[in-house]
Amino acid sequence: PISNNGVLEMSKVEEVLNKEKFLDKEYDTLLDEFQYCPSERSFIVSLLKEFKLAFSLDNGVLIPDLLDVQEPDYDFDKTDCIEIFFKYDFLPSSIIPQFIVIKNNDIKEKNLVWKSGVYLKSKDFNSEALVISDYEDKIIKILVNGKNKREYLIILRDVFNKIHKTFENINPELFLVIQRLDAKPVNYEYLKQLEEEGEKYYRPHMNDGQMQKQEIKILLGDIRSKEDIEK
């Protein structure tokens, strides 16, 4: 009853919830093996939504964790975009599904969401974002372009920060990719430390061995968090 795009039609939700194991093998980690009476079925669906595991569509419910693993084709303009990534010691598989549920109203097109990522478009900020997880490298990267990309990135970072706080011992490092330079990504906290010490410029070592100084205030201005701005 589960389609390959992760959508459960409401009639099929009823059918699935009649099984001995909730959502059969595809979602047997969510609940133990119990049978549910009809009065409990809507509660289970609402529970999925409450725990940011699913969201409603016109024709059913979408569960991001059941989406296709295959990344779809898309055309994201990286020109002058801001790119950051979170680096984890351990990357929980539920972070991206929760993020997708929270930001489901911004999904650009129904086919531009998959198990490990999503393509967003914000009308409010006139910007787009590409959010992708890499479980092998234990990173989640965020690329944002558009008229108000900095403001949109603040919103997206705030969502991730709130998700991180629901886990114990999850404190990922944040890195900025300097798009205009062929240099290694720079740690966000390191840039803040340089600024606090009175440094005006960050001097990255580029891959060709040269150095090209970058104004720290400008770099941090691209990626400051909501908390940092409010301090």
Image (cartoon, grey):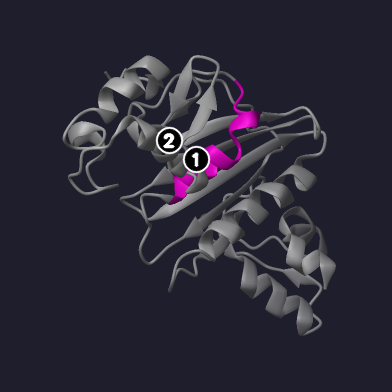
Q: Quadrant of residue 213?
A: bottom right
Number of residues whose C-alpha sits closer than 10 Å to that of mark 2, classed few (under 14), some (14–19) or many (20 or more):
some
Q: Nearer the viewer, residue 214 or 113?
A: 113
Mark 2 — residue? 45
Q: Position of residue 215 (x, y in %)?
A: 79, 63
Tell me the crowding category of disc 1: few under 14, some 14 to 19, or many 20 or more residues within 10 angstroms, Cα based: some
Which amino acid, by three-letter code, is at mark 2?
Val
Where is 101 relative to 227, above or below?
above
In magenta segment, residue 138: no
Residue 105 shown left or right of residue 51 in the figure: right
Residue 2 image offset from top left, x and y in percent? 29, 21
Q: Is residue 96 magenta?
A: yes
Q: Secondary structure at mark 2?
A: helix
- Placement of 12 over or under 62, stated as above or below: above
Q: Amino acid at mark 1?
A: Lys
Q: Closer to the observer: label 2 or label 1?
A: 2
Residue shown at 35% from the left, 53% from the top: 137
* Residue 77 drawn at (x, y percent): 64, 27
Q: Is residue 85 left or right of residue 23?
A: right
Q: Is residue 175 above or below residue 194?
A: above
Q: Which residues are magenta?
A: 95-108
Q: Are marks 2 and 1 in contact (CB under 8 Å)?
A: yes
Kindly identify which numbered label has been placed on residue 49.
1
Quarter in which the C terminus is drawn: bottom right
Which numbered circle lies on residue 219?
none
Between 227 and 74, which is closer to the camera in this rendering? 227
Total numbered circles: 2
**Which image quarter is the N terminus in?**
top left
Q: Residue at x 43, y 21 (%)?
A: 72
Dominant SS in magenta: helix
The residue sitting at 34% across, 49% down in the picture is: 135
Of the pair 3 and 161, the residue shown nearer to us: 3
